[in-house]
Amino acid sequence: MDLHIAASIVPLLGWAVHGSILTRRLACARRDPLTGLHTRAGWTARAEHLIRRHPNAAVLLIDLDHFKALNDAHGHAAGDAALVATADRLRAWCGDNGTAGRLGGDEFAAVIRDLTAADLDALTTALHRPLPYDGTSLPLAASVGVCPVAELPVPLLTDALAAADAAMYAAKGRTRRGSHSTR
């Protein structure tokens, strides 16, 4: 090989390797390391895309109930197990109909393409199923707020999140009184 050609290829190869490393790091930064769900940035990009393309889409906010008490009573490893179980259940519920993310702490979000095809009761049931952990059964509960995008004057993610947040806090109040309705 000509020395001139080799001298040209080496920097290109270096840039290709560097680009691959940066792409991998960016992908990792958009995934929550504990749950494997999208982080806020990764989820937001996907959610905006889905609500633009699917008029029957819905945005959900999910907040674990009594999470601090679970952590205090059973330790942070149990809390992490509860977060992972919640993520797995939410991911399974979304399936091919949407995508889920962990916004931070014990708060999760999902966007689904078609609310009419979703079984919200099944989600609530899954999120309230106890978690077997270290020889015991951890009680899990979550409040879910839903915003059908079609009900918004303009289908914007920020407005859908605000409406889902209000619905979640309304559900959180009902959950404390014994009901766990999602809407």
Image (spheres, rainbow, N blue to C red):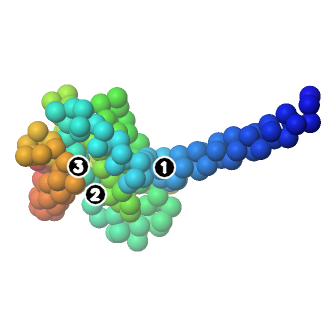
Q: From mark 3 to mark 2, how far is it between C-alphas?
A: 18 Å
- Amino acid type at image mark 3: Leu
* Front disc: 3 or 2: 3
- Residue under the image location 14 percent in, 59 percent down: 166
76 relative to 32, above or below: below
- Report the disc number at residue 31: 1
Choose between 48 and 13: the one closer to the eye.
13
Q: Position of residue 138 (x, y in %)?
A: 38, 55
Choose between 88 and 33: the one closer to the eye.
33
The answer to whether the residues at label 3 and label 1 have Cβ atoms under 8 Å apart is: no
Secondary structure beneath dot 3 equals helix
**182 on left or right of 134:** left
Furthest residue in direction bottom, as rendered: 72
Quick one: label 1, few (<14), some, or many (20+) residues within 10 Å? some
Q: Which residue is mark 3?
A: 157
From the image, which quarter does the N terminus lie in? top right
* Front disc: 3 or 1: 3
Sequence-wise, the earlier of marks 3 and 2 is: 2
- Amino acid type at image mark 1: Arg
Q: Position of residue 9 (x, y in %)?
A: 80, 37
Q: Position of residue 151 (x, y in %)?
A: 8, 43
- Amino acid type at image mark 2: Asp
- Report the disc number at residue 153: none
**122 on left or right of 170:** right
Quick one: label 3, few (<14), some, or many (20+) residues within 10 Å? many
Q: Position of residue 40 (x, y in %)?
A: 38, 54
Q: From mark 3 to mark 1, how far is it between C-alphas?
A: 20 Å
Q: Which residue is mark 2?
A: 63
Which image quarter: residue 149?
top left
Residue 48 visible in the current orientation:
yes
